[in-house]
């Protein structure tokens, strides 16, 4: 039996509640949903621009070029990071039987992180306009400093240089706040904590590497190689270990049975640690980066698919005998839907990193569909499942409407699946258009039906989010006594 299950036989959930700052968990979830809403509006704006339906065309501060960066940054650092931090405040104290190192530090990190995300968005939107002001140029000339107030020129690393040190300090404080209770834990460490400890170290190093080295230390193809590592490691060494660690905690608890194989869980952890950092160069195949690095990235990417297969087998083995839970238990359905999407994205990776396949889909919308499937179809669905499970517990009341919870699931899962399939097909068509050496306009015109479909798929996903937000608002508003006299709803804390 796992450590998590051992503790559950000794202590009840009520006994552990005093270890968890439930108000902070709720605050992180609400902040994450706020940034997710902004991010999805930005994504819709960019999608409308591609089909010439942008109602805000011509407004500089609302230009799709700037809001595309808002779209990605608000997802990575505003939504995913916030909800993961809320999840960590729930899980780590319960697994270690210790509170976080400092509640005032937790509150400081919460406020500081929201400020970091907000300032990043503000700098992306208004930074270029400020940069053009004469006094800024004059100050830069007199001081000899590069007064770059806007985004940095790196994919996913657009955070302005003056925010990077603050973000790194925040990541270090997060590591300290959670590593202290882990270090004080007396029981053997469950695999969830292995993933979390790795994420604390990897995220700090990945952020520093991607945001500092290409800007200040290296250039040329070396900067490209580091940028590729950063892009992929942000997913593989920040989001993935937190996501899989979270699954190893919540799935056994909801199914009320231990994980199928502790040995396979360790294979998944060490496979991720060994192979994932080598993947980044596969974003830069057919570039001047040395071919031995490109070949290594191809082999490591295929190996990651094999590692992920062991993890999926482990969770399917855990579900064995309780398959009906996927139908009756909405958070479990979120989790296993995300796992299937994760397997598909890794299988895509194993195909698309081959040099032959890259000739067709490089720089096409295939890559965009792939990215949406992993970031929304996997990690966002997982976090929706966690919030669906935990909101009734931190609010101490069941959901206002289980039907709205179901709408949220189906609109989100179906929307992202349609978007991924649509953009995958668009990428194949674009690749053949370019290979035929027709003019660029031909590929743009041929992409229009796919881009129109992408708009409606995105609106479907956004509609799901609106269902969730409305359901959450009504759950707040309806008096507690209504629930006490009514029937139990799915997701009830009982």
Image (cartoon, rainbow, N blue to C red):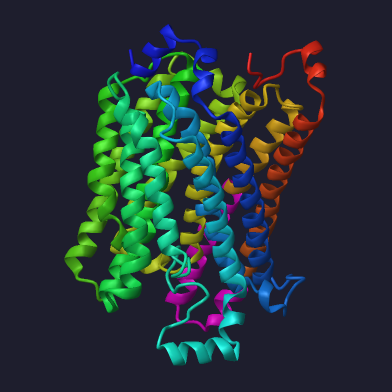
| The C terminus - image quarter | top right
Residue 399: quarter of image: top right
Front one among 301 and 74: 74
In this picture, residue 281 sits left or right of residue 398? left
Say if residue 446 shows up in the picture: no
- Indicate the position of residue 266 as horizontal and vertical percent values: 26, 30
Residue extending farthest to the top is 10
Residue 433 colored in magenta in the image: yes
Residue 118 colored in magenta in the image: no
Front one among 305 and 93: 93
Name the residue rendered at 29%, 64% in the picture. Answer: 355
The magenta segment is: 417-445
- Indicate the position of residue 54 as horizontal and vertical percent values: 73, 70
| Magenta stretch prevailing secondary structure | helix
Name the residue rendered at 75%, 72% in the picture. Answer: 56
- Indicate the position of residue 3 as horizontal and vertical percent values: 34, 17
Front one among 175 and 370: 175
186 over 474 or under it: above or below: above
Residue extending farthest to the left is 292
In this picture, residue 262 sits left or right of residue 494? left
| The N terminus - image quarter | top left
Residue 475: quarter of image: top right
């Amino acid at each position: 039996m796992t450590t998590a299950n051992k503790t559950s036989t000794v202590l009840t959930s009520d006994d552990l509640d005093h270890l968890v700052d439930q108000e902070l968990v709720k605050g992180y979830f609400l902040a994450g949903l706020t940034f997710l809403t902004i991010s999805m509006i930005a994504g819709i704006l960019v999608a409308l621009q591609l089909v010439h339906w942008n109602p805000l065309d011509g407004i500089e501060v609302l230009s799709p070029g700037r809001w595309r960066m808002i779209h990605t940054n608000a997802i990575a650092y505003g939504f995913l990071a916030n909800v993961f931090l809320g999840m960590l405040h729930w899980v780590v104290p319960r697994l270690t039987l210790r509170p976080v190192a400092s509640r005032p530090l937790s509150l400081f990190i919460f406020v500081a992180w929201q400020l970091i995300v907000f300032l990043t968005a503000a700098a992306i939107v208004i930074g270029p306009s400020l940069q053009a002001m004469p006094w800024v140029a004059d100050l830069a000339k007199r001081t000899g400093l590069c007064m770059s107030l806007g985004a940095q020129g790196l994919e996913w690393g657009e955070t302005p240089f003056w925010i990077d040190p603050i973000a790194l300090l925040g990541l270090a404080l997060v590591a300290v706040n959670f590593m202290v209770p882990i270090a004080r834990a007396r029981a053997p460490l469950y695999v969830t904590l292995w993933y979390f400890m790795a994420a604390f170290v990897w995220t700090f190093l990945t952020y520093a590497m991607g945001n500092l080295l290409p800007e200040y230390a290296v250039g040329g193809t070396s900067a490209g190689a580091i940028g590729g590592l950063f892009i992929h490691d942000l997913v593989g060494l920040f989001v993935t270990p937190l996501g899989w660690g979270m699954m190893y905690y919540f799935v056994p608890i909801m199914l009320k049975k231990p994980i199928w194989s502790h040995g396979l869980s360790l294979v998944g952890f060490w496979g991720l640690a060994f192979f994932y950092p080598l993947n980044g160069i596969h974003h830069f195949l057919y570039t001047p980066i040395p071919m031995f690095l490109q070949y290594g990235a191809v082999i490591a990417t295929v190996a990651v698919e094999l590692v992920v297969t062991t993890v999926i087998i482990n969770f399917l083995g855990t579900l064995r005998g309780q398959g009906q839970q996927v139908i009756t238990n909405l958070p479990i359905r979120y989790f296993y839907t995300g796992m299937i999407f994760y397997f598909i994205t890794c299988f895509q990776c194993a195909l698309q990193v081959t040099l032959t396949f890259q000739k067709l889909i490089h720089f096409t919308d295939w890559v965009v569909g792939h990215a949406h499937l992993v970031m929304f179809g996997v990690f966002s669905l997982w976090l929706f499942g966690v919030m669906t499970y935990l909101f009734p517990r931190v609010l101490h009341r069941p959901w206002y409407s289980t039907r709205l919870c179901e709408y949220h699931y189906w609109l989100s899962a179906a929307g992202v699946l349609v978007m991924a399939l649509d953009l995958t097909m668009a990428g194949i068509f674009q690749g053949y258009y370019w290979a035929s050496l027709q003019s660029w306009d031909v590929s743009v015109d041929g992409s229009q039906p796919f881009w129109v479909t992408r708009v409606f798929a995105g609106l479907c996903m956004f509609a799901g989010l609106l269902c969730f937000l409305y359901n959450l608002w009504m759950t707040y508003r309806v008096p507690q006594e209504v629930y006490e006299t009514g029937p139990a709803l799915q997701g009830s804390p009982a």
